[in-house]
Structure formats: structure tokens, C-alpha cells
Image (cartoon, helix red, strand yellow):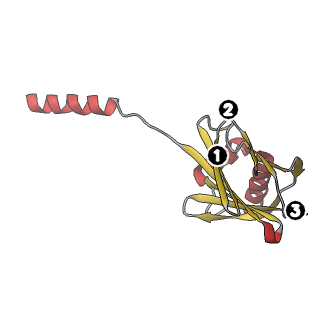
Amino acid sequence: MKKIKVFLFLLVLLTSFHVVHEYYLSTTSLKWVPAKQQLQITSRFLLDDIEALMQEKTDQKIVFLPDSNPAEIDAFVKAFYLNNLDIAIDGNQYKLDYLGREYQDDLLIIYAEIILSSNKLKRFEVKATFLTDFLSGQQNIIHLSLPGRKKSLLLTHKKTTFDFTLQ
């Protein structure tokens, strides 16, 4: 009987110190293709985070994969994306062309692009606020890929922008 009491005490003690660490992360890749004068943009988000955000904003149960309401989800995802990513190149603000979305396992992948009139760039300014007002621990990693150069930056709710100048 004493062994059972000790076992139960240890079990309660060990389970009471269980700490949950939740990580909220998105990645966005910006790939400059000079031959096409195109900035190709791909972002990845955890589906659970986007579903929770949409449910809070629309106050209704939304299911992705399979889509419970494709038209409503498309409109929400597009607005979410375009409202949370701003890109300026050489001091000029550019409008993103939203191309669409798809699912890969538990990820929502979003595609966009910017077509430029020049194939020579000097400076990138990126502001990414994805989920930072919804999830306090949200981190957004931005990967910038240029011919011969790569740069990765971590953005959070405290730091939502970065500047990168080509030398």
C-alpha cells in the first residue's frame, strides 16, 4: 500500500511540473528573378493558427482541408495576406499580386508575386505582421534570395520590419 501511495505522489508531482511551450512561426520566401523582373513570394503558415484567427474574426466554425466554405476562406486568406505584408523596393511601395493558396500536410501555403520594371535593385524594405496581433509569441522568418546572396531575418511583434541594401 505504501508503494502505491509513493507512486501516486510521484505521478502527481511529475505531472504538476509539466510545462507547455508553444511556438508560433511562419516563413516567407522572397526570391528575386532578374530575368523575369519578378519577385516570387511564398509564405507558409500552420493551418491551426489561420483557422483560429478566422474563427475569431468571423465568429463561426471554419474548417480548412477540406474547405468548409471555399469562397469565404479564399477571401479571408487573401485579405489577411495582403493586409499583413508590405514590400517597398528602392523606396517605391509595390502592390502584391495574390496568386492563390494550397495545403501541404498541416500547412497553408500562399503564393504572390511582384512584377517590376527594372532588373536592377538596390534596397528592399519588408514589413510582415502575420499573426502578431493574434498570437503574442508569433515569429515570422523572412528569407530573401537574390542571385548570389541570401539573407534571413526574424520578425516579431516588437520588430515587424527590415531593410536590406545591396552593396
The residue tagged with tag 1: helix, strand or loop?
Answer: strand
Q: Residue at x 21, y 28 (%)?
A: 9
Q: Amino acid at mark 2?
A: Lys
Compared to 5, does 143 lie above or below? below
Q: Residue furthest front?
A: 167
Q: CA distance from mark 2 to mark 1?
A: 13 Å
- Can you say which quadrant of the picture contains the N terminus? top left
The residue where tag 1 is placed is 153
Is residue 69 in sight in this rendering?
no
Marked residue nearer the N-terminal end (3 or 2): 3
Q: Nearer the viewer, residue 121 or 107?
A: 121
Is residue 54 visible to the viewer in this orientation of the structure? yes
| Amino acid type of the residue tagged 1 in the rendering | Leu
At horizontal 15% and vertical 29% (from top left) the residue drawn is 6
Residue on which the image places disc 3: 116
Mark 2 or mark 1: which comes first in sequence? 1
From the viewer's side, name the closer residue of 153 and 95: 153
Could you tell me the amino acid type at mark 3? Answer: Leu
Front residue of 100/150: it is: 150
Residue 60's spot in the image, x, y percent? Answer: 69, 47
Residue 42 image point, x, y percent: 69, 60
Is there a contact, CB below 8 Å, between mark 3 and mark 1? no
Residue 41, quarter of the rendered image:
bottom right
Q: Of the numbered discs in the image, which one, if any, rests on residue 158? A: 2
Q: CA distance from mark 3 to mark 1?
A: 23 Å
- Say which of marks 3 and 2 sits in front: 3
Helix, strand or loop for disc 2: loop
